[in-house]
Amino acid sequence: MIVSLLPGEQRRIRSCISQRVYDLTKKRRSDSSVFYKSIHRDLKSKFNVTSYKEIDRRSILDAIKFIESWRP
């Protein structure tokens, strides 16, 4: 049975995404919106969901590792 992320876990994922995009766009802020779209698309594809909020709670650490190592 798949159990979606709790609100606090969703915030953690959003925070990780924001931090990753910030790290990748420190010098060129104009790329940030493209990176946000790309990382969300890749995350949803990796975990086969329509929203990051639907990621199985048991996979949250895998999702965080994926985000932290994500490359455009």
Image: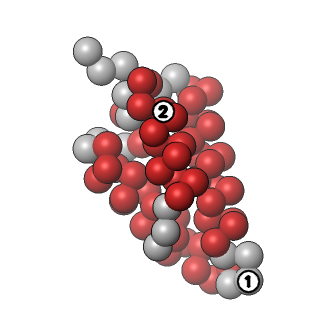
Q: Residue at x 38, y 34 (%)?
A: 55
Mark 2 neighbour class, 10 Å CA radius: few under 14, some 14 to 19, many 20 or more: some
- Give the image quarter of residue 12: top right
Q: Residue 71: percent from the left, percent from the top?
A: 49, 69
**Above/below status of 58 relative to 12:** above
- Give the image quarter of residue 19: bottom right
Name the mark on residue 60. Answer: 2
Q: Residue at x 53, y 43 (%)?
A: 64
Residue 34 appears in the figure = yes
**Above/below status of 63 relative to 60:** below
Q: Residue at x 52, y 53 (%)?
A: 67
Mark nearer the N terminus (1 vs 2):
1
Instruction: Report the side of 45 relative to 23 (left or right).
Output: left
- Give the image quarter of residue 29: bottom right
| Residue position for label 1 | 27
Instruction: Specify the amino acid type for callout 1.
Output: Lys
Kindly state the secondary structure of the residue where label 1 is placed: loop
Kindly state the secondary structure of the residue where label 2 is placed: helix
Name the mark on residue 52. Answer: none
Instruction: Specify the amino acid type for callout 2.
Output: Ile
Q: Residue at x 43, y 67 (%)?
A: 38
* Viewer-closest of 44 and 60: 60
Residue 37 appears in the figure = no
